[in-house]
């Protein structure tokens, strides 16, 4: 039930309970301390009166003063009989026989409920005088003490609840003021929709926890907005890339079915349709691979050791039908090993060679460098073409991005994006740069087998060639 209360009421209730316990403790300590202080003062005053009474009690006819209704004095003989007494305690001895025996041996202080006509309770002090066995007795009422303590209790009983009420009201107002920025952020968050994705939470000027919370949520909204925009752009680009082969495939089939065709015409139409179908299949596989790498995140553990040279030789062998052996040059040590999935390494290098062959000029030089103590193994693929336009270089690994001179080459703009995704999935990174001597160099960096825990940062696209 309490959990359903508003937060400001729960905070106020918790503060009120804590404050009530504190005030109760303060009240108890105050009353106890006041009573003890009054007791000490009364006892000290009573001892002074007893000291003054002792010399008087040794005289033949002690003359005792009348202390009124608050104090009384007696002088008793060794048998406990009254020798002299003030008027208010003249009826009977103030000490019992047992107390009298104790007083003969030394000073005695006791409390009685009543004593003569004094208002009870009464504190009595007695001590021997040293003359004929006489006992000097002084008494003082404790009624004033009890009345003062009772008045203090009554004042605290009225004052502390009022203080508690004022503290509770102050706590409620303070909690409401402290939570007001949170309520403003909540109200603004309720208005953020897909139609207004750029709205952000109001952040208070104070540099406190609420301000940092608002800043953190705004940063989160920025990241979510950027992710949504990327997804929207991805869907739009994918739709655009899929529309062209689908339109061509539809056109080929419609033309083939419009009127009777010869076998040669049907074969040509089916060949063209098959080409577009294969293009659609490759595009779908690329999109699926990108989606999987986005969902997978960083690798949970390093991949298995994979020799680099056999994978590179296998990839180059597939391109021998279109590129002769002088157009692809490999420089890789047989002992070089990385921690990566062999299939991912094969796919990444294939995309790099395909990108170099499509947009660059031979020869294509593939160089695998020994592991660095920080970065790992670097696989460089360089062509000798015109290079990448400087303004396009920072976006070379973005999805569906192609330089102006590559838009007619038939690519989808996913090749380098797939290389970067495969590198990230295996704990590596990919960079690109224009070589000083011409052409483009794309660098695929993967963790070395002897450095499985190496962290490879995402270097900028325009890395040194």
Image (cartoon, grey):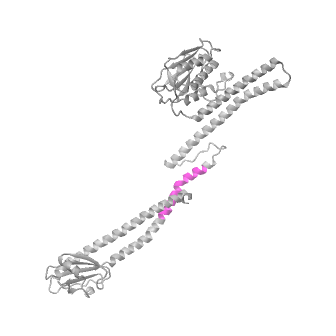
Left or right placement of residue 56 versus residue 227 in this view: left
Residue 327 pos. (x, y %): 60, 13
On the question of residue 385 being in view, the answer is no
Residue 225, placed above or below residue 135: above
Majority secondary structure of the magenta segment? helix
Residue 69, placed above or below residue 390: below
Magenta segment range?
A: 166-188
Which image quadrant is residue 248 in? top right
Which image quadrant is residue 391 in? top right
Q: Name the one closer to the observer, 397 or 331.
A: 331
The residue under the point 63% across, 43% down is 197
Residue at the extreme right of the image, as rendered: 259
Which image quadrant is residue 65 in? bottom left
The residue under the point 84% across, 25% down is 258
454 within the magenta span: no
The quadrant in which the N terminus is found is: bottom right
Residue 60 pos. (x, y %): 14, 86
184 within the magenta span: yes
On the question of residue 163 being in view, the answer is yes
Residue 92 pos. (x, y %): 25, 87
- Count the marks: how many? 0
Residue 220 pos. (x, y %): 56, 42
Left or right placement of residue 39 versus residue 199 in this view: left
Q: Name the one closer to the observer, 57 or 389.
A: 57
Residue 323, placed above or below residue 226: above
The residue under the point 62% across, 16% down is 319
């Amino acid at each position: 039930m309490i959990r359903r209360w508003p937060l400001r009421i729960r905070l106020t209730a918790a503060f009120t309970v804590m404050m009530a316990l504190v005030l109760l403790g303060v009240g108890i300590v105050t009353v106890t301390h006041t009573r003890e202080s009054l007791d000490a003062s009364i006892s000290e005053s009573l001892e002074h009166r007893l000291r003054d009474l002792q010399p008087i009690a040794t005289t033949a006819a002690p003359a005792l003063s009348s202390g009124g209704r608050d104090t009384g004095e007696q002088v008793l003989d060794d048998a406990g009989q009254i020798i002299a007494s003030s008027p208010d305690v003249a009826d009977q001895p103030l000490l019992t026989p047992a107390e009298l025996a104790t007083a003969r041996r030394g000073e005695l202080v006791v409390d009685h409920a009543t004593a003569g006509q004094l208002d009870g309770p009464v504190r009595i002090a007695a001590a021997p005088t040293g003359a004929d066995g006489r006992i000097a007795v002084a008494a003082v009422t404790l009624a004033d003490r009890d009345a003062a303590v009772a008045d203090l209790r009554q004042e605290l009983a009225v004052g502390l609840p009022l203080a508690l009420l004022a503290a509770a009201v102050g706590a409620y107002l303070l909690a409401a003021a402290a939570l007001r920025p949170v309520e403003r952020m909540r109200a603004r968050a309720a208005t953020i929709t897909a139609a207004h994705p750029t709205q952000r939470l109001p952040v208070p000027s104070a540099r406190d926890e609420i301000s940092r919370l608002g800043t953190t949520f705004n940063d989160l909204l920025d990241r979510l907005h950027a992710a949504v925009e990327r997804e929207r752009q991805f869907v739009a680009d994918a739709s655009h890339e899929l529309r062209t082969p689908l339109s061509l495939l539809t056109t080929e089939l419609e033309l083939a079915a419009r009127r009777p065709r010869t076998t040669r015409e049907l074969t040509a139409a089916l060949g063209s349709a098959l080409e577009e179908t294969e293009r659609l299949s490759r595009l779908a596989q690329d999109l699926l691979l990108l989606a999987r790498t986005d969902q997978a995140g960083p690798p949970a553990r390093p991949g298995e050791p994979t020799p680099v040279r056999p994978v590179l030789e296998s990839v180059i062998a597939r391109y021998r039908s279109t590129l002769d052996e002088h157009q692809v040059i490999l420089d890789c040590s047989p002992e070089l090993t990385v921690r990566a999935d062999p299939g991912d390494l094969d796919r990444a290098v294939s995309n790099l060679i395909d990108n170099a062959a499509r947009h660059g000029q031979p020869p294509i030089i593939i160089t695998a460098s020994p592991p660095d103590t920080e970065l790992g193994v670097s696989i460089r693929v360089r062509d000798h073409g015109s290079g990448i336009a400087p303004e396009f270089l920072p976006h070379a690994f973005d999805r569906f991005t192609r330089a102006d001179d590559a838009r007619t080459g038939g690519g989808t703009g996913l090749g380098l994006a797939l290389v970067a995704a495969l590198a990230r999935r295996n704990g590596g990174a990919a960079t690109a740069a224009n070589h000083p001597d011409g052409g483009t160099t794309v660098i695929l960096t993967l963790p070395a087998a002897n450095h499985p825990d190496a962290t490879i940062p995402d270097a900028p696209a325009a890395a040194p060639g």
